[in-house]
Amino acid sequence: MTTRFDPVILPATPAGPARRLGCVSLAWFGPLLCGMLLSGIEAAADEAIFREDFDGFRDGRQNAAQVDSGLRLSFGGSLPGWRRTGQGAVHVVDRSGAGDLAAMIWEDNILTREDGLAANERGRNYLVEYDLGPTVYATPPQASAATDGLVIEVLRADGSVLAAHQDRPGAWAGRQEFHRSGFDYRGDGSGPVRLQIRTLTRAGRFGGAVDNLIVAAHSPAAEHFNAQVAPVLARNCLECHHGSGAKGKLDLSTRDGAGRGGKSGPVLVPGDVAGSELYAQIEADEMPPKHPLPAADRRIIRDWIKAGATWGQRTLDPFVYSTGKRAGYDWWALQPLRAVPPPDPEISSAAANEIDRFLVAKLQASGLRPSPRAEPRVLVRRLFIDLTGLPPSPEEVEAFSRDPSPQAWARLVDRLLASTHYGERWARHWLDVVRFGESDGYEYNGPREAAWPYRDWVIRALNADLPYDEFVRLQLAGDALRPGTFDGAAATGFLVAGVQNKVAGAAKGMKETQRQDELEDLAGMIGQSLLGLTINCARCHDHKFDPIGTEDYYRFTALLAGVRDGTRKMPGDDGTTVAVYTVMAEKPVPTHVLLRGDVASPGVEVAPGGLRAVVGVKADFGLGSEAGDAARRTKLAAWVTDPGNGLFLRVIVNRIWHHHFGRGLVETPGDFGFNGDRPSHPELLDWLAGWFRDHGQSLKQLHRLILTSAAYQQTSAPTDDGTRLDAANRLLWRQNPRRVEAEVLRDSILLVAGQLNPTPFGPGYRDVKIVEVSPAFYYLPTDPAGPEFNRRTVYRWCPRGQRSALLDTFDCPDPSVQTPRRSVTTTPSQALSQWNNAFVLRMAESMAARIAAEQPAAKGSDPDPLPAQVERAWRLVLGRAPGGAERSESDALVRRHGLALLCRVLFNSNEFIVIE
Amino acid sequence: MNLPTPLSRRAFLDFSATGLTAAALACLLGRESRAAAGTALPAAHHAPKAKRAIHIFLVGGLSQVDSFDYKPELEALHGKALPDSSKVSTFSGAVGLLRRSDWSFRQRGQSGLWVSDLFPHLATVADELTVVRSMVADTSNHMPAMFQANSGFQSNGYPSLGSWLSYGLGNESDALPTFVVLPDARSQPNGGASNWSSGFLPATHQGVLFQSATEPIRDLFPAQPTAADAEREGLGLLARINQSHLAGHPGDGLLTARVRAYELAARMQTSIPEATDFADEPAFITRSYGLDRPETADCGRRCLLARRLLERGTRFVQIYSGGAFGGKPRHGWDGHEDNRENHQREAPMIDQPIAALIKDLKQRGMLEDTLLIFTTEFGRTPFAQSAAGVIGAGRDHNPQGFSVWLAGAGLKGGTAFGETDDFGLRSVQDAVTWPDLHATVLHLLGLDHERLTYYHNGIQRRLTNVHGHLVKGILA
C-alpha cells in the first residue's frame, strides 16, 4: 500500500516525558498514539508488542563533511537487535542534539530485526507506527529528493512478506521535520514476524529517517471499529467525505479528520450520541443525502459513539468496500479465483462435461432444460465458422454426418484447431480488442508499412498454442524478454497498434498533452484488453466507479513511460532484415500525478507500479524513478500474468466463451468493473479460469473443453419455456444463433467461389488507393480483382478512417477504437452492398464458372447438366441440397439468367449469413 | 414496446402490414443496441424546436475578427504588440504584431448585426443569424480540434454529433440515410470518415458520404449492368428462400429484419436518384444557389441537395467547406501564409450558396423547424503569425475565442451572444465550449444531452462526456 492518508503532524519538539492519558499505557509512545485524543477521537491499541527508539546505536563515527545541515550525523556502528545486510554503513541522525537518534536508511542496506514478534494472530489487526523524516544530507548527490522513500516490511518466518508499506518522507527543506506515519496489517497466524526496513530506490540514495517505531495489536474496541463501523463509514460517507477535497471539509477517512470535524466544527463527541452532529444528521435522514442509512447501520454508529468512538485502522480507504454506487477492492472480479467444484445435477446428455453441470444446475433451478443436440449438418457448419471462419465443404458436411463414432466430434474439433485457419480466425478477434490498425490516424494518418509482423505474430502464436500468459508477456515486453529477435519486436507491436498523432504544434504544453493522451489511450487499451478495467478513467480524477485512484493511474502509466513507436530493422528467418513497426524504447522521464489531468499542474512524483485494485498480486514493483523501460515493462508483464491474478484469467476465459456462445458469461468483455455486466454464472467463470490456469493456459485446450460441452452442441431453436422464462437466454437453454462477421462473409464467399487464395502472412493486400496530400494521407476504397486480393480478410491492409462498403455494412469496425464486442446491425445499405457490390458479383461469376468446370455428375441418365449444377451451388453455399420448390425455382432462374445469378442469390440468403 | 415516435403512424401501419415484429423493427432502425444497453429511450426527450439540421463546417479556421466579431479597437491597435502574450495558445508559437481586419464591418438588416464584407450575401440574411462570438476550443491543433467540434472528444473513435442524432432520433425516412455528409469537391477533410464516424455506436449511425450525382452512395446499383428482369427475378427468389427459411424460425427478429432490409434497399434505389436529380428545380432556384457559376457550383449543389434531402426525411446533413490541410493553394480556411488572400478565395465559394439555402428554407416554411449550424474548428489570431515586431500577412490558429452561428429552429435571429476581449483574442464573457454547443444543438432537436447515453467500455457515454451546459442565452 502506498500512502493515501493525511499523516498525523507532530509538534516540532521531540517526544516529551511520558504522559499517561488513560487510553493506552505506552510510556513515551503515549502522546504519539493518543495524540488524537486531543481532537476527540481515541486511537486504541493494546500495549506495544515492540518498540524501538534507535538511541542504542553505538560505535559510530561522526560525519564531519555533512555539518551544513546543522545536525549531527554518525555512521558505521551498529544497532543492537538489528541485522544489517548490504554494503552501506548504518547512519543515524541526532534529532534533538541530545542523543535522540533516528536511523537513516542508506542505499543498499537493509535493517532486519533479529527477534520474532508475537504479532501475527490470525485475523487480528496490528498497527505499525513510526516517526518519519527526510534524510539530512543537504548537498548533491545525496541530497534527499521527493522520490526517495523507504519500505517497511513485516516478514513471516520463512522470509516472505506478510505486509509492506512504502513511505516517502519528502525532500529535505532546510530543517528537520518528522511526522508520524504508519500502517495496519492483518495477521495470518503463520507464526512470529520480523520487521525489516530498506530504501525504495537503492543506488546512492537515502530512503529516509525513522524513529520511535512501534508494533501494537489493535484493541478489542479498535477491532470492533474495523469490523463494524469502518464498512458503514466507507460505504456511506467516504464518497464525499474523503481526502483534501472532502465536502464540508469533513474528512471521515482518518482518525484525525473525523476528530477535527468539518467546516462547522466537530461532528463527534465520544460517549455523547445526542451531542454528535454526525449522528444527528443521520438520524434526521439528511446524511447520506437521498439514501437514508438502514436501521442496522444507524445502530452501529450510535453504539460506537456511545461506547467512546474508538478509532481503528489509521486510514479508511474509500476504495476498500463496494457500495451501491461504485466498486471497491472487495468487488467480485478483483478477488483471487475461488476453487469451486462443479455441482452434480442429473444430466441426461451423454456428451455433457463439467461445464454442463454448472449450466444445467442453474437451468433446473429456473425450471428449464438444455436443448437437444443439433443435427450434424448444423453442428459442422457452426464449428467450422467458429474455429476457422470458413464454411465446411459439402464433402466435409457429408463425412461428419455419416460418421457414427462418438469420437467424431472431438476429432473434428482437434482437426480444426490444428488448421492454420484457426489462427487467422481467432487473431481477428484479438486484433479487434487491441484496435490494430495500419495507419497513424489523426491529421496525417500516415501509412504503417511494417505493422503486419504483429498481425502475423498473433496468428502464429495462436496456431502454436502459446500459453496465454506467455502470449501476453511477449506483447508487453517481448523486446526486453527476447532482445534482438524478430518475434520479440513483432509481439511488442501490441503496444503501438493504436493511433498516433504526428502533428504537434510548437506551442508550449501541446506536446506534453499529446503524450499524456497517448499514455491514456495505451493504459486504457491494456487495462481493458487484459484486465477488463477502464484504467484510463482515472486520469483526471479518481475512477468514478472502480477502485482506481489517479495515483494508481499515474503509477500505471509510469510503467509505459518509455514506450514510443517506430520502425526497427530486425533479422528475418532467411538472413534478410525485415522492418517491424514496434516499440522504440526510450529512457522514461519521471512521472508525476497531474492534477485534473492538466500537464501544467504536476503533483507528486510516483514510482511505476501496478493497480492496488487487483487483489492477490503485489502492486508495488520495488521500482524507483531511475528504473529503465525494460525493467518497467518486464515487471508489468509479470504482474499482469501472475498466476494469482484472477482477473487476468477470468477476462480471457470470458472472451473465448463470448465467441463460442455469441455472448460472454460477463456480457461486457472489456469491462469487469462496476459499470460492466455481472457474470451470469460466477462459479462457472471461476471454475473455467482455474481449469485454464491448471492446464497450462492453453487456449486450444480451453476451446476443446467448451466445444465438447453439450451446451455448445445444443440446437439454437427457441422453446416455449425458454422464451417465457429466459427470453435473453442468459442461462443458455439453447445455443445463440449468430450473424457472421464481415470477414467471415467475405472469406466464405471467396471459398465457395473457389477463389480463396490461402497464402498466409506478410504484407497485406490493399483494396485502397493511397492519396497523399502532403503531409497527409487518404485511403480511397478501390475494388481490385485478382488472386493477390483474394486472400483472407485478416490479411487486408487496414488503415484508419477508411471504410470498405461491404465490410462496413456488416459492422467491421474502424480500428480507431477497441471493439471487444461487435455490433450486429441490419440496414438497407447492408442489403444494397451484399446484393450489388462488385466483389459479390465477381465471385458469383467465379462460382458459376467453377461449378461448370467441375461438371457435377447429372442424376441418372439426365443429359441436362443444369439440375446437378443447381444442387452443387446449394451444397457449396449452404451445405445442403435444395428442397422441392427451392430446386424447381432455382432451375427456372438459372435457365433464364444463368448460374451466376443463383450464386448471387445464395450469397444473399439468410441461411448463409446466420449461423444456427 | 413503445413505438418510437418518429416512425409515425404511417410507417407503423406500413410495417404492421408486412407483419414485421417489434424486434425486427428495432433491428432495422438501429435501435437494438440501445435496447441491449438497457437504456431504451423515447425518440425525443422533449418537444423539439427543430426536426432536422444542417451543419456547415469551415475547415481550417475562419478568422472571427474578419467575419462576425467586429473589433473597432483592433483598428486602432494595428501594428501594436499584444500586451500580454504569455498565455496565448497558437500552433506555430509565432506572435507578431496585432493586425486589423482586412474587411470593413457594417451593421446589417433590421437587427444591425455586424457582418464584414467578407460575406456580402450572408450579410443580407443577417437577421436570421444567431452569432456566438465567445466559442472556445481545447486545442490549437487542427485534427483534435475538428474531432472535438464533431464528437466532443479530441481523439479518433468517438461518435459524431450526426451519429448521436441518428441514434437518438432514428430515421424519419425509410428510403434515405439519416445522416449524410457532403464533402468539398476539392478533397475530403483530413481524418476522412473519422469525422463522421459512429465510433462505438453501431455502424448504421455513421455519416453516409454522398459522392457524385451518378451513384451518390456506394453499391446503390449493381457494379455491372444487369438486366432488369434478372434483378427482379433474382430478388424474388431470394425473398422466397428467405421466407421459407424464416418459416422454420418463426419470430426471429434478425431474419425478419433482413427480409425487410431488402425491400427498403429497393426503395432507396428510387429515392436517392430522385433526391439527387435537380431536373425539377426551377432555374431561378438553381441560379440562386450559384449552380451556374464555377466558383459557387460545388457548394451550391451541395446546399441544394441538403435541402432536398431534408425535405425527404434525412435528419442531418453535414457540408464541408474546405478539405485537406496542406497543399498550395490550401483547400480551406487555414490562412497561415496570407489570411486575406486565403479568405478572399474561400468565402465567395460558400457565401452565396449558404445565403440562398437560408432564403430557400425560409420561403418554404422549413426554416422554422430546421436548425442551421455554421462552425469552424477554431478561429484565428488577431495578431499576425510572424516574428515579433512584424505585421505579417498570415494569422495563426486561435482556440481561445472565435465565432460560430446558428439559424432557424425558432432562434432569435440578428443577435450576437458572448464577447471576446478588445482584440478578439479571448472569450471574456459567456464562453461557450463545444460540449455547451453540442448540448444546445441536441436540446433544439428534442434531446437531453445528459440522457442520450450509450454504454461503451465501462461508461455510459455521452456526446458531451461529463460537460455541457445549455447556452440559455440564445434559446428564445
Image: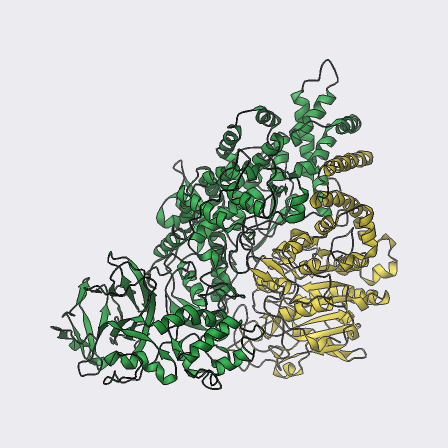
The residue positioned 75% from the left and 59% from the top of the image is: B315
The x and y percentages for residue B331 are: 65, 60
Q: Colour of chain A?
A: green
Chain whose colour in the figure is yellow: B
Residue A559 is situated, as x and y percent measured from the top left of the image, at 40, 59
Q: Quadrant of residue A34?
A: bottom left
Which of the pair B152/A394 is nearer the observer? Answer: A394
Q: Quadrant of residue A90?
A: bottom left
Could you say where residue A221 lies in the image, as x and y percent from the top left? 36, 74
Residue at x 39% of width, y 83% of height: A40
- The percent coordinates of residue B177 (x first, y second) are 74, 53
Please identify the quadrant where the N terminus of chain A is shown.
Answer: bottom left
Q: Is residue A438 in view from this perspective?
A: no
Count of numbered badges drawn on the protein: 0
Q: Say left or right for B163 vs A86.
A: right
- Which residue is most to the left? A59
Is residue A639 at least partly visible in the picture? yes
User: Is residue B287 placed above or below A646 in the rendered structure?
Assistant: below
Query: In the picture shown, does residue A497 fall above or below B106?
Result: above
